[in-house]
Image: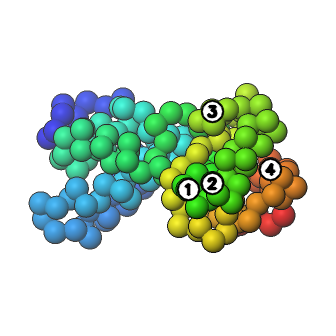
Amino acid sequence: MSNNGNHSMKFSDATLAKVREIITHYPEGKQKSALLPLLHLAQEELGKGWLPVEVMDYVASLLNIQPIEVYEVVTFYTQYNQQPVGKHVLEVCITSPCCQLGAEEMVHYLEKKLGAKAGETTADKMFTIKPVECLAACGYAPMMQVGEHYYEKLTEEKVDRLLEKLRDTPYPALQKVEF
């Protein structure tokens, strides 16, 4: 094992069964390939939307890899949160093509509207503003991802309507919020 295996938290029995099933999809000795889906499970069930160090260490122990191997992945991919986040994470693409079409202005509007800066969570824990790199929707900027859903060609009016709808939407939003 990569560490002592003594964890204060662990997956439910149902999730552990799912973990074992996911690991079987990869060849013996290549269990690290299961890291991304296990991190998604861990972020949802154990981290309540983010990945504290002890959760990342637990995932490393399940895969018999070094914790640093997990940290490297978590710090690279924007879908993993390294600090507590709000009920809805507003991931605004800020890559150059999107910025040319108003992404930076959209981030500033969200900051003003929500009273939180980029990278912060609103006082009511409802929203986190998270500027991210390319979401591969350059032709639809400014855009943002909330959960698994893209919201494109945003205007201040569209953002206002979306935020209002999201306030009444449970997490995770399983269907795209229509506004």
**How far apart in space, not on screen, are marks 3 and 1 (Cα)?**
22 Å
Q: Which residue is mark 1?
A: 96
Give the mark, 4 or 1, whose residue is nearer the N terminus.
1
Q: Are marks 2 and 3 in contact (CB under 8 Å)?
A: no
SS of the residue under disc 3 = loop
What residue is rendered at 71% in x and 55% in y?
A: 102
SS of the residue under disc 1 = helix
Q: Which residue is mark 2?
A: 99
SS of the residue under disc 4 = helix
Give the mark, 3 or 4, whose residue is nearer the N terminus.
3
**How far apart in space, not on screen, are marks 4 and 1 (Cα)?**
25 Å
**How far apart in space, not on screen, are marks 1 and 2 (Cα)?**
5 Å
The mark found on residue 120 in the picture is 3
> Would residue 113 be found to the left or right of residue 144 on screen?
right
Q: Which residue is mark 4?
A: 163
**How far apart in space, not on screen, are marks 2 and 3 (Cα)?**
20 Å
